[in-house]
Image (cartoon, rainbow, N blue to C red):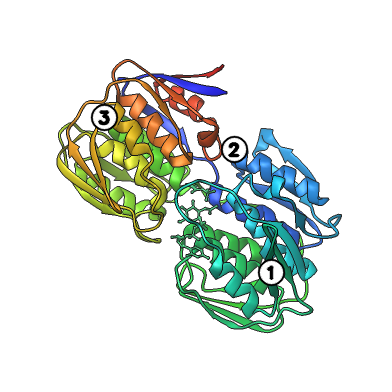
Amino acid sequence: MDKFIIKGGNRLTGEVNISGFKNAILAIIPATLLAKDKCRIENVPLISDVYILVDMMKELGAEVYLDEANNAIDIDTSTIEDCVASYDMAKRLRASYYLVGAGLGRFKEAHVAYPGGCDIGSRPIDQHIKGFEALGSTVKIEHGVINCEVDKLIGNDIYMDVISVGATINVMLAAVMAEGKTIIENAAKEPHVVDTANFLNAMGAEVRGAGTDVIKIRGVKELHGCTYSVIPDQIEAGTYIVAAAATEGDVLIKNIIPKHLESITAKLKELGVEIIENDDSIRVIGKPNLKSINIKTLPYPGFPTDLQQPISVLLTKAEGTSIVTESIFEGRFKYVDELKRMGANIKVDGRSAIIRGATPLSSTKITATDLRAGAACVIAGLIADGDTEVYDINHVERGYERIEDKLRGLGANIKKVTE
Ligand SMILES: CC(=O)N[C@H]1[C@@H](OP(=O)(O)OP(=O)(O)OC[C@H]2O[C@@H](n3ccc(=O)[nH]c3=O)[C@H](O)[C@@H]2O)O[C@H](CO)[C@@H](O)[C@@H]1O
Ligand SMILES: C=C(OP(=O)(O)O)C(=O)O
């Protein structure tokens, strides 16, 4: 078991490069299944979720070369004959559910066990199922496996009852190979929905409107391989922005799309942090005496749920009462108990965390209960006095490339220890 030991108190200063977007690459790798061909994906983050997905694609029969030196993947899916993913494979990450949409598109059949992913509340897949059925597929859940079969996918109008990133992307994956036109209404607008659509279009698909709440897809008979570069990780960038502000540092966050970060930078400005935006970077200049603010997580372009946990650590430094309302995942407050053990004054009331500050944090042993809870623990360690030990960092490594190296490059005192 690995852990981080962080000696808190250092200001973060300097520059950090943001990696490719976890939530985009995790859709794009399964999407390569749609073309019986070779793809090269660039700007791939070297995170454990990617290693797991690469293994899954190999187990399905793909030839995959992970070019770590260049953060790229060469993948040839022409050797895959069917799309069957066992419980042992699928449970290892959330994005395994994209094999259902991609498998249906390519083989008109997919048998994929229920996905895993962060334990942050109930994560139903009813909207995915609704979409596949609307395209003509049968969907049977048997022994924990999602079984889909169809003779011919036929395009349809699909209204999503809830805004779901996963369902929007999954239905898009199947619909690009359906006969005729599919319209997805109330679609998710997240940057990774757009990135996946752009990747599909680079493979020859006809997807229009991604980034709005109406996506129109004209099905094609065949897709081809392509070379594609993944967009920067909005959530990793937001995490470093928060870490810079929390340590009252001065950090240039590079290789980003500032537009994707507007909901975050707006909140940081409200808190009193100085933000300077450039074309593809943001400079964060942290300040003392932050003002309390309220935050509600919402689908894009609202404040992302994936940054709710990291920013709550920063709010322990703000004077007065801040209220953070989590409207997407009801179980995303598990990290609060860890912060309380460090001295934070936080009360969870239903969907809201009420944070009273400013409270200094004192170091102790804390546990990452999921990926972003882990990021919150790391930021807490950066600002606490003394040595904080963060356990279960395998969660952190699912989504942050070399986080300890990047933080050390900014002056943090952090090391990874294997016990
Ligand atoms: C791998 C990946 O990209 N994960 C992201 C994705 O997760 P994921 O795709 O699982 O999240 P969704 O956008 O689907 O979930 C949003 C909301 O819709 C609900 N829902 C979803 C599907 C469904 O069929 N029925 C239903 O009710 C969920 O319970 C949740 O309340 O988007 C989340 C919301 O931005 C992020 O936190 C995750 O990091
Ligand atoms: C919830 C997350 O991941 P996943 O959906 O992969 O569990 C996340 O990235 O914060």
CA gap, disc 2 and disc 3? 28 Å
Q: Amino acid at mark 1?
A: Lys
Position of residue 224 relative to residue 72, above or below, is: below
Position of residue 2 relative to residue 286, above or below, is: above
Q: Position of residue 171 (x, y in %)?
A: 61, 70
Label 3 close to label 1 by CB (< 8 Å): no
In this figure, which residue is indicated by the disc labeled 2? 47
Q: Position of residue 20 (x, y in %)?
A: 55, 45
- Which residue sits furthest front? 143
In this figure, which residue is indicated by the disc labeled 3? 248
Q: Amino acid at mark 3?
A: Glu
Left or right: residue 43 versus residue 278 is right
**Closer to viewer: mark 2 or mark 3:** 2
**Closer to viewer: mark 1 or mark 2:** 1
**Dot label at residue 67:** none
Residue 287 vs residue 333, the one in the foreground = 333
In this figure, which residue is indicated by the disc labeled 1? 140
Upstream in sequence: badge 3 or badge 1: 1
CA gap, disc 3 and disc 1? 53 Å
